[in-house]
Image (cartoon, rainbow, N blue to C red):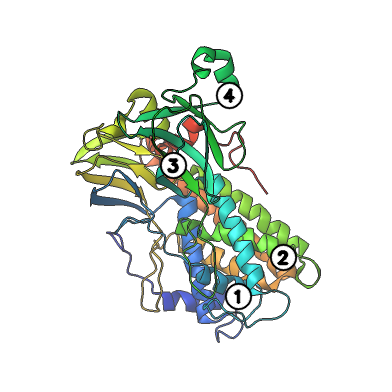
Amino acid sequence: MPNGSFSWLTLAQAQTQLSQRLNDTSFSFWTQAELTYYIQQSLRQFNSLTWTFRQDFNYNSSSLWNSLGSLTGSPRLRTLTDNYIYGELEYLLLEPSNNTGTWTGTNQFSLSDLSQALQRRRDEMIQIGNLNQVLSSGIALTPNTIRTQLPDNVIDVERVRYIPVSGSPNTLYRDDTVANEWFNAPLYQLPSGTPQTFSLSSEPPLSFQVDIPPDSPGTYEAVVLQSGEPFNPPTSTLIGIPDDFAWVLEFGALADLLGQEEESTDRERSAYCLKRYQDGLQLMLKTPWIELGRVNNQAVSIDSIVSADRYDPEWDSNPTGFGPVIVTGGIDFFAAPVNSNVGITCLGNAPVPSVGTDYIQCSRSDMDIIYDLAQSRACFKMGGNSFKESLELEKRAIQACSAENSRLKSIGAYSDILDQRGNAQERDANRYNTRGEKG
């Protein structure tokens, strides 16, 4: 739990109060295990809407590139698995839930249906949100060849460096073949030499192309966006996105599941889920996952990869001495000087209770928001008018979250600057002009 933990309401007490709102105090239609899901996911949704649980995180860096999604002790560790999501989806679809990645339900759905819908939407979220960047080293190149193939789990290429066997590395700037033809014709027509740019715009899928064929053996190093790990139930697999946006993934999967034909079809709820999924994608793109940075107790700037390459070329050729600055890529992916004490203020995961004696991490003034979100979520499986009437609760909760967000922003004179820092790479690289609007 973060510092300043709340200790006024336990999960068991919250379950009882939620069951009273649902008029099911015997837990017959909604079990305690089911209500635990709804309370947990409502806390995550609340945090994604209000950006409440900011936390400080310090670590001693031993590598240049890291992810807050996997760094030991990170407040943004990615912990949720597909089996966890199946468990809640089964409740929402009125199927028996066992949280083990096995199917004991009706013929309306199957575990394969859930797994495939979840995986499709998960990989779409990764692409739109830039959620799974990694450093791919040792990419084989063929001298005197301009095009390089990539494995099929690569979704996008953010940055490429040419690393010859002998000589200095050279970071390639992203360009396209038309620009090379128009503005760099003499250079572009060299038979071989040192590559200066790479392009993706006119190349086949799973490849990038350099302007000048490398004349020396070596490798490429690239910051790439990878698809998530394939789901293989009953084996439990990390879903591979930030925990607090699991509710968005669930709505995306439900939109597909309820849009299937025949017995599964519920067009009205499918359309509702798709809208919530699309709203969640837009929210995800605005989330301030990192706000402040420190290196050896000195406050430093937070810059994008694009900005660092532009104003401090080959900054990462000296991994211990650049900056000092923290260089951000996609959500949770960043670089900081090696062999340093690095401090980060970030938006941490919402603390969620798991057993009845755990305390709910929410202020007294905000708990009604959690109940509204959880009650609306619980009514989803009822369908029809009962569900539609519960949407007023969800609307009220979202409006309250907006008011709470405004209050938190008003606390600091430069809160708007803090909230923009984590999105620097997305702005500078301009991956989506429409900010990821997909359906």
Residue 191 in the image, given as x and y percentages of width and height: 50, 21
Using the image, tell me which numbered label, if any, was put on residue 91.
1
| Upstream in sequence: badge 4 or badge 2 | 4
Marks 3 and 4, how far apart in space? Answer: 22 Å
Secondary element at image label 3: strand
Q: Is residue 364 above or below residue 198?
A: below
- Determine which residue is flagged by label 4: 177
- Which mark is drawn over residue 392? none
Whichever of labels 1 and 3 marks the residue nearer the N terminus, that label is 1
Q: Quadrant of residue 160?
A: top left
Upstream in sequence: badge 1 or badge 2:
1
Q: Earlier in the sequence, mark 1 or mark 4?
A: 1
Where residue 287 appears, as percent x and y from the top left, is 47, 45
Q: Which residue is mark 3?
A: 140
Can the viewer see residue 283 in this picture? no
Select label 2 or label 3 by which is in front: 3
Tag 4 secondary structure: helix
